[in-house]
Amino acid sequence: MEFTKDQIMAKAPDLMKDMPEYYKNSDVAKNQLNVESYEVGRLMVTIQDVEDQLYINRTTWGLDIYEKAYNITPNPGASYEERREVIKAKRRGRGTTTKAMIKNTAEAFSGGEVDIIEHPADFSFTIKFVGAKGIPQNMVGFINMIREIKPAHLVCDVEYSYNVWNVINSKQMMWNTAEAKAWEEMKVI
């Protein structure tokens, strides 16, 4: 991993402040301590970067390792955040599939509350996004994850929450305010 000089210097200690006064007048000592300070800064940034890979919420180049460990096929076009969502959902989705596990997995993707409505007579269930309005990001990854963890004999439907005009009207929004927004924004206020 390459780091910028600013990143390195932000972590580089000021070694000169702890030196005796006669070192502060020596160009050789200044140069030597500047190089050592820079190298210590680079080491500190590298350590922080490696430490970040231990946490799913902060990992970048370590995503490949997590995907391999959880047997996830990487999506080359996905952002770091989308890839992290898949890993977190896969991690939550281990073991016997239960209503609670499907709920936890769905909430990991949506970042909001989810209801699972079972329809035993139809051998199906519905995942209803109630905590966040609109369609959550990375729905393709979400659908793939649900297909992977749900029992094969069950059918899964997904419902989203949107605002209807009465909800927007109840917020006493003036027409001029509403008119300035796109419908995509109004649906999820």
Image (tube, rainbow, N blue to C red):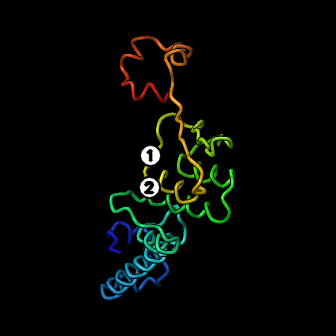
Residue 82 image label: 2
Q: Residue at x 44, y 71 (%)?
A: 11
Tell me where residue 73 sits by quadrant: bottom left
Asked whether 84 or 151 is in front, the reply is 151
Asked whether 7 or 177 is in front, the reply is 177
Image height of 78 relative to 166, above or below: below
Give the structural element (helix, strand or loop) at label 1: loop
Q: Position of residue 99 (x, y in %)?
A: 68, 50
Image height of 47 relative to 134, above or below: below
Q: Residue at x 62, y 52 (%)?
A: 102
Tell me where residue 27 sits by quadrant: bottom left
Q: CA distance from mark 1 to mark 2?
A: 8 Å
Number of labels in the image equals: 2
Q: Amino acid at mark 2?
A: Glu
Asked whether 7 or 29 is in front, the reply is 7
Q: Position of residue 80 (x, y in %)?
A: 41, 59
Q: Residue at x 52, y 70 (%)?
A: 70
Answer yes or no: do the residues labelled 1 and 2 have beta carbons within 8 Å? yes
Q: Earlier in the sequence, mark 1 or mark 2?
A: 2
Q: Position of residue 38 (x, y in %)?
A: 37, 78
Residue 137 image label: 1
